[in-house]
């Protein structure tokens, strides 16, 4: 796994659908202390994935709007 400014590249879970999500309220989402209110994530059939943490509600809402329009 590598991490740079809220971007995490990982290998693990297979076939994670591309999506915009909120962190789990139970705290199980892996963030390593990165402040965030949501994240954009995906992985392929081999488990190669990424997570990009979103730090502000404004950015989260703009991403959500863009994804609804595609």
Image: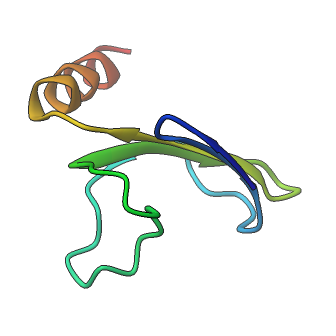
Camera-side residue: 2 or 49?
2
Where residue 19 sits, quadrant-wise, is top left
Residue furthest right as drawn: 46
Q: Which residue appears at 75% of the width and 63% of the height?
A: 14
Residue 43 visible? The answer is yes
Q: Quadrant location of the C terminus? A: top left
Q: Position of residue 43 (x, y in %)?
A: 69, 50
Colour scheme: rainbow
Q: Is residue 47 left or right of residue 70?
A: right
Q: Is residue 24 left or right of residue 29?
A: left
Q: Which residue appears at 11% of the width and 25% of the height?
A: 58
Camera-side residue: 62 or 10?
10
Q: Which residue appears at 20% of the width and 76% of the height?
A: 25
Q: Which residue appears at 71% of the width and 68% of the height?
A: 13
How many numbered dots are placed on residues in this image?
Answer: 0
Residue 19 visible? The answer is no
Q: Position of residue 51 (x, y in %)?
A: 54, 46
Where residue 10 sits, quadrant-wise, is bottom right
Where residue 9 sits, quadrant-wise, is top right
Q: Quadrant location of the N terminus? A: bottom right
Residue furthest bottom as drawn: 26
Q: Position of residue 60 (x, y in %)?
A: 21, 32
Q: Is residue 31 above or below residue 66?
A: below
């Amino acid at each position: 796994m590598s991490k740079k400014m809220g971007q995490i590249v990982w290998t693990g879970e297979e076939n994670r659908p591309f999506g915009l999500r909120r962190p789990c309220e139970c705290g199980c989402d892996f963030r390593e202390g990165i402040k965030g209110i949501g994240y954009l994530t995906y992985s392929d059939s081999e488990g190669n994935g990424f997570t990009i943490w979103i730090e502000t509600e404004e950015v989260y809402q703009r991403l959500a709007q863009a994804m609804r329009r595609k």
